[in-house]
Amino acid sequence: MIRNLLPLLFGPVTSGRPAAVCRLVETRGSTPQKAGAAMLVYADGSQAGTLGGGCVEAEVKRKAIAAIEAGTMLVERFQLDDDYGWDDGLICGGRMQVLIDPLATESSRQYYAKFTELLATGQGAIEAIVFDAEASELLAPDCHLFDRDHRLLARSGTNAGTPAAITIALPSLESRPAPSATHGIALLPVLPRCRLVIVGGGHVGQAVARLAADLDFIVWIIDDRAEYVTELRFPMAERRVAGLMGEVLPQLEIASDTYCLIVTRGHNHDEEALYHLVNRGARYVGMIGSHRKIRLIFDDLLAAGIAAELLEKVHSPVGLDIGSQTVPEIAISIAAELVACRNRGRLGDWGRDR
């Protein structure tokens, strides 16, 4: 994904190395990757990222190297027929349109530098890329970078202004939109990163943290035992906090896009953590445990004045029902539920063992 590739353009080792940014802006039919996929191609033919492999990727690389030499940004269309079969002989039959930007102009370099800077904040962004002049009736190729509030931050391509048709079409990142393309204009959102607060630094918490970091969550880890929240155990965590639940959790920043996972080492700690988190307005609160344990905890919290409607929103037992037995399986089921809630909203009863 573009979020992982852009830092390579401006890192201490690769900065200044001739490269082309290749962006998949539109797909039709069956293709190995969908709009939004990205790849860096260097002048020596090496690459980072992928557009799906096979002969078409080799052709993109060839055209990207030529674009670096020519210093020209362009859009190339690839029909995935017999000419671009995969190495195993399978034919997808779809169509791909790829923007190739060799970063030959100052506006292109500034565009991707600003893009890198914006993505580092985790706030997300939206690109509007004009790739088809005839369909859009606009100059192409042309790239426009907006922040989550639809403020234009950078442009690359033609010298024209930003048409009103583009700004009107921009989606809200709050709805977590998918990439789309219409009338020759691609809208490529990079969604804001959500914070995952994991309460409990044991085996399950550690396994979930590894998966969640790869799934683009910002991981915070909380435990009352300092030796369980070390950098060695949680190198992927942005924040590691050791302290008593009753002291740490009430002071913790919880936003409307925060996900909270309770996987402590015991019943009492789970109950205390849920007491402090269930009414904080988090998008997701999940707690590990058996049906009996959950019922006992919920009864205690009801007696302590926690509203029943808040407890009804808690995902517990946590995770999708995949018959999990081992720690890695439990972590996978939890990570899948987190992604499903992030991408689809609150879960119904599908995939759950209640």
Image: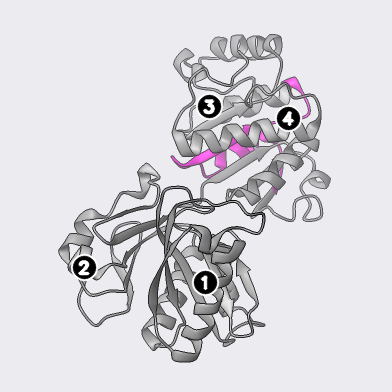
Amino acid type, label 1: Val
Q: Which residue is mark 4?
A: 330
Q: Does the CB distance between marks 3 and 4 fall below 8 Å? A: no
Amino acid type, label 4: Ile
The image quadrant that residue 328 belongs to is top right
Instruction: Name which of mark 2 and mark 3 comes first in the sequence.
Output: 2
* Residue range highlighted in magenta: 241-267
Q: For mark 2, does the 10 Å Cα neighbourhood hold few (<14), some (14 to 19), or many (20 or more) residues?
A: few
Amino acid type, label 3: Val
Q: For mark 3, does the 10 Å Cα neighbourhood hold few (<14), some (14 to 19), or many (20 or more) residues?
A: many
Q: CA distance from mark 1 to mark 4?
A: 40 Å
Q: CA distance from mark 2 to mark 1?
A: 23 Å
Instruction: Name which of mark 1 and mark 3 comes first in the sequence.
Output: 1
Amino acid type, label 2: Glu
The mark lying in front, picked from 1 and 3, is 1
Q: Which residue is mark 2?
A: 134
Instruction: Name which of mark 2 and mark 1 comes first in the sequence.
Output: 1
Q: Quadrant of the N terminus?
A: bottom right
Where's residue 178, x and y in %? 40, 47
Instruction: Name which of mark 1 and mark 4 comes first in the sequence.
Output: 1
